[in-house]
Amino acid sequence: MSNAAATDDPARWLESVAAEEPGRPLLETAERGVLSYGQALTLSRRLAASLASLQVAPGDRVVAQVEKSPEAIALYLACLHLGAIFVPLNTAYTFAELEYFLGDAAPTVAVVRPADREQVRQIAARCSVRHVETLDERGGGSLLQIEASSAPTNKRSHDPSALAALLYTSGTTGRSKGAMLTRANLASNALTLARAWRFTSKDVLLHALPIFHVHGLFVAINTVLASGSSMLFLPKFDADEVVRLLPRASVMMGVPTFYTRLLQHPGLSRERLGNIRLFVSGSAPLLAETHREFQARTGHAILERYGMSETLMNTSNPYEGDRIPGSVGPALPGVEVRIADPETGTPLSEPDVIGMIEVRGPNVFSGYWRMPEKTAAEFRQDGFFITGDLGKRDARGYVYIVGRGKDLIITGGYNVYPIEVELEIDALPGVVESAVIGVPHPDFGEGVTAVVVAKQGAALDETSIRGALERRLARFKLPKRIVVVDELPRNTMGKVQKSALRDRYRDLYR
Ligand code: AMP
């Protein structure tokens, strides 16, 4: 790692590289070329000055619902400089959803896409948001046109325990909650990842993730900043473009769908990967089969890691040592991970026992924004955060995620972990992937239900799949119905939306 960058305040990463080597590239885009660390510092200071002239003070929220661009990153860095709290929002959120977020976060400024400005102004007026400004992906927008001299530096706002960001959770149950992340959370996790994954200033990260999410923003960008490395910055994932750029990259971070799509691309070959030293996957489960197929095709074992908005990264397969397909690896240095009884929180120290994954460490957030009761309910007395993910740990400390707690199926009084059934189905010839859910059933409470995607031309139907599963699974785990579909619903991070499937099939047994 570059020593200059290895400080523990996230605002100083950019400053120290810019002072040491201003011309070093921070990122490069196809349309707009290179943005150096020096230019990024100038741009972020300019945005900080604009925000300050709008009376943004330390602790104020700045909401951003903007396209991916160098300016969007500079806006995040401007907030770090000012001590304002950055609140990135998924660009797919509708105006109705935005109204909830503006009401909840109560920002001083909302920065949006130019086309949205008028409508957002009306919403902002109802939510008492003082300013609505814009940024576009070509380097324009009203926030850059504000006449402002310079941004004050208030070092107290760089206190490690000060909030740096609110990340709204995907909100698959109930209203989305704002996870409050401190500067210390961001700093410790980025430095841990940069060390664990051996980042140096020579690295070039291929960045094709969205930047409103923990993965693209904090795992990717903070690790780059903390190590003074560079990025090839794509507006979104495009397999042709990724294959074209891979020869210039040394690291790629992606969600599992990136890897399944790359495997379908004829241009993915060992020759194109001469420079690559690391592929990282996370945000959703990487099928063991994808891991193996990718390794056979490219010689690279994808490194899978596990984290969430509330905790940043918790576990990672090792850089050196076994990267086990289907496992998210052991706890990262400095992070405590335990498996506990979901009801009582009693730690389950025996290996291979399934329970709630709980986490404690400098990476763990300080609570949900304006939801003290919700926060209290999701921490144990001893400070462990209850992740909501069920999993187990083997004798070597490798963690395996079994599913979200709320995806657990209880049928006729028996617990069924969807992943056990999914793994059996996925192993059948002709199956691409599957999702197993519980839906209301008059006799059993919930009926185990499988939604299966078949390979093109595969002769798969309910009877043949059930026939194959009968020999492999206990009766109570056998799906009562199996539906074959063309594809599974996924969100932008590639997570299968089981709640959408539960909705779609809720009347299947009525
Ligand atoms: P988010 O806060 O949107 O990043 O979602 C976090 C959730 O994504 C976690 O609680 C897990 O359920 C899931 N997740 C993240 N990484 C992985 C992984 N490598 N394997 C399986 N699930 C994952």
Image (cartoon, rainbow, N blue to C red):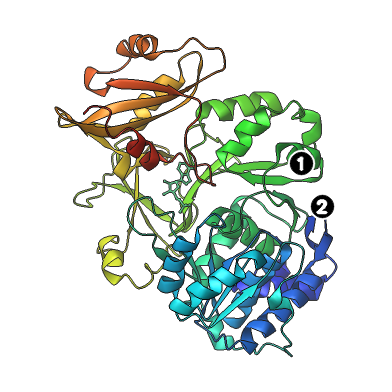
Q: Where residue 431 appears, x then y in whole percent?
A: 49, 19
* Label 1: element kind: helix
CB atoms at circles 2 and 1 under 8 Å apart?
A: yes
Q: With respect to residue 196, does 191 lie above or below?
A: below
Q: With respect to residue 167, does 479 lie above or below?
A: above
Residue 494 marker: none
Q: Where residue 480 appears, x then y in whole percent?
A: 27, 21
Q: With respect to residue 17, does 425 lie above or below?
A: above
Q: Quadrant of the N terminus?
A: bottom right
Amino acid at pointer 1:
Glu
Q: Give the spatial CA distance, label 2 vs label 1.
A: 10 Å
Q: Label 1: which residue?
A: 241
With 219 as the anchor, is 434 left or right in this view?
Answer: left
Q: With respect to residue 62, does 236 lie above or below?
A: above
- Residue drawn at (35%, 59%), measured in percent from left and top? 175
* Label 2: element kind: loop
Amino acid at pointer 2:
Ala
Residue 30 marker: 2
